[in-house]
């Protein structure tokens, strides 16, 4: 990651960066340092021909709210927006998405797949976990309780979907396996809910130090 600019904006630090030729923005609380890192949230955005400069105004208020809660927020240029090339078929899928939304029809599953899968499939999760400098915690059904973990240092949560979960290769690379204790007959949470619980506990422990 190469930082290209930095400025202070009403209690947060905004840094523009490039990563493997992809433009991005990182918003951090003023208290975040290498010795005292803050949890990272990846903010999605709709993209557009203007790239990050077009979507930055709508992301900045959300990043500021996240910083007040102790989170660092990152966003990267969406494929097909700004200077980033779109994978084959994305333009057609976007046109079909707009057509379905305008007509009030459900968005076909194959349209969603053509927009999302090229991004997901290009992510090398194994390499990200292997190279992460802190502790990586894989959420599984058989790990130690989340609430028994020390989450005050540099931590990355690895969360799979509700049905298939994480691959064994990813689980084997993680520092530890953790689970979110579930009451009654509830077996699991979806990925978004699990991430919210984990991040809340991370912030709770950090603020208690």
Image (cartoon, rainbow, N blue to C red):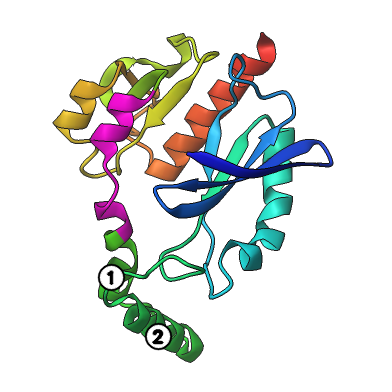
- Residue pointed to by mark 1: 114
Name which residue lies at 64% across and 68% down.
54
Q: Is residue 88 magenta?
A: no
Name which residue lies at 40% across and 29% down.
157
Residue 28 location, x and y as percent?
66, 35
In the image, taking residue 148 as reference, residue 117 lies left or right, namely: left
Pointer 1 and pointer 2: residues touching (CB < 8 Å)?
no
Query: What is the distance, in whole Å, between disc 1 and disc 2 at their CAs?
Result: 12 Å
Q: Helix, strand, or loop for circle 1? A: helix
Residue 99 location, x and y as percent?
43, 89
Residue 37 location, x and y as percent?
59, 22
Residue 115 location, x and y as percent?
34, 68
| Rendered position, 38 above or below 40 | above
| Rendered position, 179 above or below 101 | above
Q: Is residue 43 visible?
A: no
| Magenta-highlighted residues | 119-132
Q: Quadrant of residue 206?
A: top right
Q: Main secondary structure of the magenta part?
A: helix
Q: Is residue 104 visible?
A: yes
Name the quadrant of the C terminus: top right
Q: Nearer the viewer, residue 146 or 79?
A: 79
Q: Quadrant of residue 58?
A: bottom right
In the image, taking residue 137 as reference, residue 148 lies left or right, namely: right
Neighbour tally class for label 1: few under 14, some 14-19, many 20 plus, Cα within 10 Å: some
- Residue pointed to by mark 2: 95
Q: Nearer the viewer, residue 55 or 163?
A: 55
| Rendered position, 113 above or below 155 | below
Q: Helix, strand, or loop for circle 2? A: helix
């Amino acid at each position: 990651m190469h930082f290209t600019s930095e400025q202070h904006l009403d209690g947060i630090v905004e840094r523009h960066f490039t990563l493997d030729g992809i433009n991005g923005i990182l918003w951090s609380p003023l208290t975040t340092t290498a010795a005292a890192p803050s949890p990272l949230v990846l903010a999605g955005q709709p993209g557009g021909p203007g790239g990050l400069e077009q979507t930055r105004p709508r992301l900045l208020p959300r990043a500021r709210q996240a910083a007040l809660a102790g989170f660092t927020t990152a966003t990267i240029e969406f494929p097909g927006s700004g200077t980033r090339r779109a994978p084959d078929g994305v333009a057609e899928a976007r046109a079909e998405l707009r057509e379905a939304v305008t007509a009030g029809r459900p968005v076909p599953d194959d349209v969603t797949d053509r927009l999302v899968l090229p991004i997901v499939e290009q992510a090398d999760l194994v390499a990200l976990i292997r190279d992460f400098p802190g502790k990586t915690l894989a959420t599984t059904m058989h790990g130690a309780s989340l609430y028994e973990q020390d989450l005050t240092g540099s931590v990355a949560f690895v969360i799979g979907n509700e049905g298939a979960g994480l691959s064994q290769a990813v689980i084997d690379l993680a520092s530890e396996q953790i689970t979110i204790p579930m009451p009654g007959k509830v077996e699991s949470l979806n990925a978004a809910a699990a991430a919210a619980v984990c991040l809340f506990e991370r912030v709770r422990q950090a603020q208690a130090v």
